[in-house]
Amino acid sequence: MIELYDLCLKDDLRISPYCWRTKAVLTHKNLPFTTIPVSFTEKDKLAFSGQDRVPVIKDNGTVVNDSWAIAKYLEEKYPEPKLFPTLGIRESCRFFNLFVDNTVHGALIRVFVNDIFAHTLEKDRAYFRADREKRFGMTLEQLAAQRDANRPQMQEVLNQLEATLAGQDYFYGQFTYADLCLFGTFKWVTSVSNEPFLDQTPHVRAWWERMQKQLGL
Ligand SMILES: N[C@@H](CCC(=O)N[C@@H](CS)C(=O)NCC(=O)O)C(=O)O
C-alpha cells in the first residue's frame, strides 16, 4: 500500500493543494493508499525524504517528493488509467501546473491566507505567521485588511479559466493531469472557506462539481 505524507491542520483537516493533487492521482489510478499526517512544524517526519515539503510518497521502498515528480512516477509505474495521454500533453501539463502554482495560487492566497491561519494547529501558528509574513512582506492583519482589494485579481484569474472551460469540458479538451492540478487548488480553498468564490464563473463551477463527482473526493 502506498503511503502519502499529508499536511494536517486542526481537527485532522487536510488542505494542501499539492497533497490533494497526489490524492487525486492515486484515486484516478485506483491505487490504495494510506496517509501519514504531518503538521507544518513536524519536519522531522520528512527527514527520510531529504527535504521538508509534502507531498512525499513511499511506494515499496521508493521515496518520491514533489507533486509533479510524484505524478510522473505514478504514470510510469502504473500507466492506466492515464494522466498524460501523450508526451505533448505531459509537457503542456507541466506548463499548466506552473501556471496554477504561480498565477492561480498567487491570486487566491491573498484572499484566503487568513482562513488557512484560522485552521492552523496552535503549535504551528507562530511558524506559519512568521513564514507567510516574510513571504508577503506584511503582517497577516495587513493581508486581511487588503482582502477585498485583492478580490479583483482573483476574479481576473478565475475569468481566464472560465474562458477555456466555456468551450470545453476539460482544460485540454479531454481529462488530463491539468484538471487534477486545479482540483487540488479548489480543495485547498473549499476546505478552509465557505465563500462561493466560483459564483461569477459558471463553467468553472460546473467543471469543479463534475470533478468532485468523477473522483468521489
Ligand atoms: N512544488 C511542491 C510544493 C510543495 C509544498 O510547498 N508543500 C507545502 C504544503 S501545501 C508544504 O510542505 N508546506 C510546508 C511549510 O509551509 O512549511 C509540490 O508540488 O509538491
Image: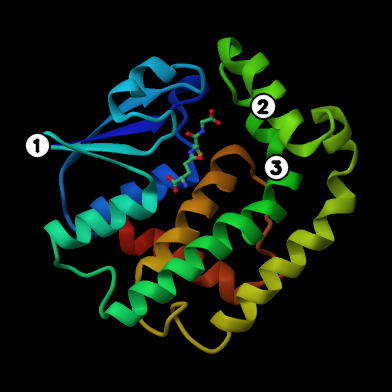
The reply to whether discs 3 and 1 touch (Cβ–Cβ < 8 Å) is: no
Read off the residue under disc 1: 60
Residue pointed to by mark 2: 131
Q: Where residue 112 is drawn, which disc sits there? A: 3
> Residue lying furthest top in this view?
123
The amino acid at mark 2 is: Asp
Is the residue indicated by label 3 positioned so its CB lies within 8 Å of ligand 1? Answer: no
Q: How far, Cα to Cα, is label 1 from label 2?
A: 34 Å
CA neighbours of label 1 inside 10 A, class few (<14), some (14 to 19), many (20+): few
* Amino acid type of the residue tagged 3 in the rendering: Phe
* Residue 40 relative to residue 86: left or right: right
Mark 2 CB in 8 Å range of ligand 1? yes
Residue sticking out furthest to the bottom:
167
Whether residue 175 is visible, yes or no, is: no
State the SS at label 3: helix
> Is 54 in front, or is 173?
54
**Residue 185 or 62: which is nearer the viewer?**
62
Q: x, y (%) of residue 115?
A: 68, 34
Q: Which x, y percent locates residue 32?
A: 15, 44
Earlier along the polypeptide chain: callout 1 or callout 2? Answer: 1
